Image (tube, rainbow, N blue to C red):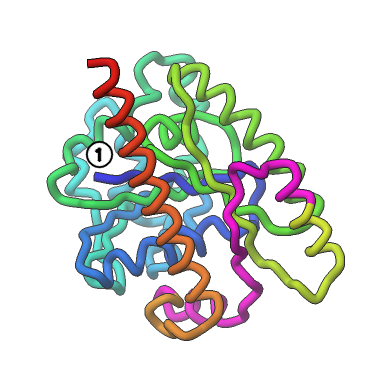
Amino acid sequence: MRVFAVANQKGGVGKTTTTVNTSAPLAAAGRRTLLLDLDPHGSLTSYFGYDPDSVKKSTYHLFQTDAPDPSKMIVQTSVKNLDLMPANSALATLDRQLGVQEGKGLVIVDALAKLKDKYSYVFIDCPPILGVLMVNALAACERLVVPVQAEFLSLKGLERMIRTLNMITQARGHKLPYLIVPTMFDKRTRAARESLTSLRETYPYNIWDEVIPIDTRFRDASKLGYPLTMLNPGARGAKSYRQLLTALLRKTHEDELARAKINSEVA
């Protein structure tokens, strides 16, 4: 099971769009893929036609002392082989409810361990704030995807995300690989071009070589509750997300080879 988390400590940067359109090509290729919605806003849940205010079984219930079997919380999406564990708006109350309870940072790790034989890939849509939900997502994933809109305020949000990542890295005891993905890029504007240049200069080793362009067809696809990568594979945004998936899988494979080499040398 490969687990990716999609996160940024700023909303409106394309987290849900990235989650949907990066995972869908895997499902289309016959790979069983699970989406986890950990954002109290429930954008991913709403994308596929479920109501975060009324869904009965959700990621929220994983954190309860009498949590049911995770497989009982999973619902189908409009895409074959692409399942969803939806969010409930009650997720917003978790930090207050849990307080300083120990052992709540690995809830998602434990839940996914029970599902490892059912799915090949998992994508986690994270909330835009640091709390127990983001801590869980970062603990569970093997690579973090950070969508960043090419504009000034998003760059500030990225700085906060990198600080959070460094904190989590210290707790994990090893680095969590991450890939910055420039989204909603409009090459016609100087602000977007300058922001992209700044990103590449500041994070030269952690930024994707390409960009996700502005494409109004993303909005059309979301209204239909279907990934653009499947609804209109020829759209420029769809092509970009397939390229992103290829890059993620390649980097994950390279990480595997590097770990295997280190282990063989130690042995």
Please tell me whether residue 78 is drawn above or below residue 7 in the rendered image. below
Q: Is residue 180 magenta?
A: no
Does the image show residue 109?
Answer: yes
Q: Is residue 87 visible?
A: no
Question: What residue sits 48% from the left and 67% below the top?
Answer: 241
Where is residue 77 shown, x and y percent of the image? Answer: 30, 68
| Residue 159: image location, x then y, percent | 71, 37
Indicate yes or no whether the magenta region holds residue 208. yes
Residue 140: x and y in percent read 36, 34
Q: Residue at x 83, y 58 (%)?
A: 194
Residue carrying label 1: 112
Question: Which amino acid type is shown beneath numbered disc 1?
Answer: Leu
User: Which quarter of the figure has residue 107?
Assistant: top left
- State the image coordinates of residue 27 (x, y, percent, origin top left): 27, 66
Tell me the quarter of the picture where residue 263 sits: top left
x 35%, y 67%: residue: 24
Left or right: 131 with respect to 153?
left
Residue 166, placed above or below residue 6 = above
Please, which residue is most extreme toward the right here?
Answer: 190
* In the depicted structure, whether residue 253 falls above or below residue 184: above
Question: Range of the magenta residues?
Answer: 198-227
Is residue 117 rendered to the left or right of residue 149?
Answer: left
| Nearer to us in this view, 231 or 85 | 231
Instruction: Tell me the SS state at disc 1.
Output: helix
